[in-house]
Image (cartoon, grey):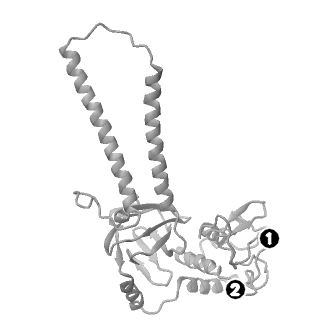
Amino acid sequence: MFQNLPFWPESASSAAGNVDALYIFLVVLSAFMSIAIFITIIVFAIHFRRYKHPEAEPVEGSTILEITWSVIPLGIFLFIFAWGAMIYFQERTPPRGAAEVYVVAKQWMWKLQHPEGPREINELHVPMGRDVKLIMTSQDAIHSFYVPAFRIKQDVLPGRYTTIWFRATKPGTYHLFCAEYCGTSHSGMIGDIVVMEPAQYQAWVQSGGAFLSLAANGQAIFQQLGCPACHKAETQGRGPTLIGVYNRPVQLEDGRIVTADENYIRESILAPNAKIVSGFKPIMPVFQGLVNEEELNALVAYVKSLNQPSPGAAALPTLAPPGTEVPGSKD
Ligand code: CUA
């Protein structure tokens, strides 16, 4: 709606309209207040200079006036807060069934991996109209994934996952920037988001040839590292079974109950002793330094893929049986 204004960034995502509306509201409100204050100052300056200043009159407090000028701004600020919070939660809560793209940032490039297998550098192809969830981490410094046309920006941190999602609404090529100063070539850490018609996108995926999916890749690494020796699928091994663990509550040895989200799985691989599952011993070796970020992403994708119910799979006593809904689970 504001596309014709100069300097207005293109809007190409489902979130863009909401962000723009709030932004316009803030600008109009600020402009209105600034103009009102300036006019008042000028009018008073002229008035009291021209008509001499009257004898100074002591001004007594006015409760009604004070309440008015406190309550009205408070109401406006709370309104802005509620509006902003709504948009924030929309942008932070990926819809169910969103396609998951893993992002690894490093000095100074973006590495992106599709669930179907294709990898890209500084370029991300996505179909129009599909929800895309980005699961992001950094190999070194703090970076920030910023796509102005989608109105999304999210810091990318080393040592943990952060997520953001978008739904592209218009085919085209849009700028991807790094929005956090990350060293000498920060300004060169840019890329393109290419939004394609769904059919075109399918053709693009197939043109890349046959890929091992990210989860299948993760399964191969899982075998190589000897994980199945303890994490057995059908029976309870020395480690907990991983079937159906993703996004479910896990009872820990110290009594806490945590949700097995991406960050939990990640931590359980790199630093297994940080959270010991109830009933198990801290015997798992530490994999920090033995797997790189991309291998880690593949392992996480593999563990997540084990959520499909498989017949005869044993579940941890504290876990809901595979396939059941857990209240509050995000995915
Ligand atoms: Cu990466 Cu700035």
The residue shown at (47%, 80%) is 114
- Helix, strand or loop at disc 2? loop
Q: Position of residue 217 (x, y in %)?
A: 56, 85
Name of the residue lying farthest toward the bottom: 210
Q: CA distance from mark 1 to mark 2?
A: 26 Å
Going from N to C along the chain, the mark reached first, 1 or 2, is 1
Callout 2: 10 Å neighbours few (<14), some, many (20+)?
some
Callout 1: 10 Å neighbours few (<14), some, many (20+)?
few
Name the residue that disc number 2 marks.
310
The residue shown at (75%, 64%) is 252
Name of the residue lying farthest toward the front: 64
Query: In the picture provided, is 180 more to the left or to the right than 32?
Result: right
Name the residue that disc number 1 marks.
281
- At label 2, the amino acid type is Ser
- At label 1, the amino acid type is Lys
Can you tell which quarter of the image residue 174 is in?
A: bottom left
The quadrant of the picture occupied by the C terminus is bottom right
The image shows residue 158, relative to residue 59, as above or below, that is below
Count of number-bearing discs:
2
The image shows residue 120, relative to residue 137, as above or below, that is below
Whether residue 156 appears in this view of the structure is no
